[in-house]
Image (tube, grey):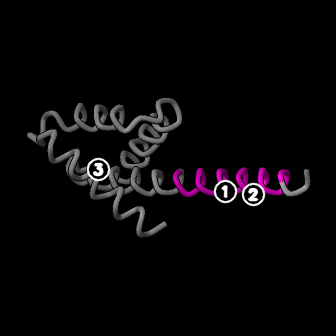
Amino acid sequence: MTNFDDREKGFERKFVHDSEIEFNIKAKRDKLIVNWVSKILDYNDEQKNNYLKKVIHNEVEQHSDEDLFKIIKKDLEDKNIQDQEIRQKMAEFLAIAKTEV
């Protein structure tokens, strides 16, 4: 049983480690997205921080990239930013975050 228990604990540690990495990648991606949107909307630091809280709240509540996309799309609807550009930026920022985490 000891080998089985050790293996089980190893898998649990790996799962926790992988979950932490995924969380950190998404957090970094979200921060990059917030910076991008904030520049487009000409937000000051306080507005940018509030927007970051909004995005983080979505991440905690929904865990969905599609919900994040909808938030960004709605916030940028007056700026003529196309869906494809938003999705491209989300993918670009995710790739950047993966290399930085």
Tell me the SS state at disc 1: helix
Question: Callout 3 environment at 10 Å: few (<14), some (14 to 19), or many (20+)?
Answer: many
Name which quarter of the figure residue 54 lies in. Answer: top left
Q: Residue at x 64, y 57 (%)?
A: 17
Q: Mark 2, residues whose alpha carbon is within 10 Å: few (<14), some, or many (≥20)?
A: few
Q: Does residue 15 show up magenta in the picture?
A: yes
Residue receiving disc 3: 90
Q: Residue at x 49, y 66 (%)?
A: 101
Of 61 and 95, the residue lying toward us: 95
Left or right of 87? Residue 81 is left
Q: What is the count of numbered marks?
A: 3
Answer above or below: position of 20 versus 77: below
Q: Pointers 1 and 2 in contact (CB under 8 A)?
A: yes
Residue 24 position (above or below residue 100): above
Residue extending farthest to the left is: 80
The numbered mark at residue 95 is none
Which residue corresponds to mark 2?
Answer: 10
Dot 3 falls on a residue whose secondary structure is helix
> Could you tell me which secondary element the residue under label 2 belongs to?
helix
Q: Amino acid at mark 3?
A: Met
Circle 1 residue: 14
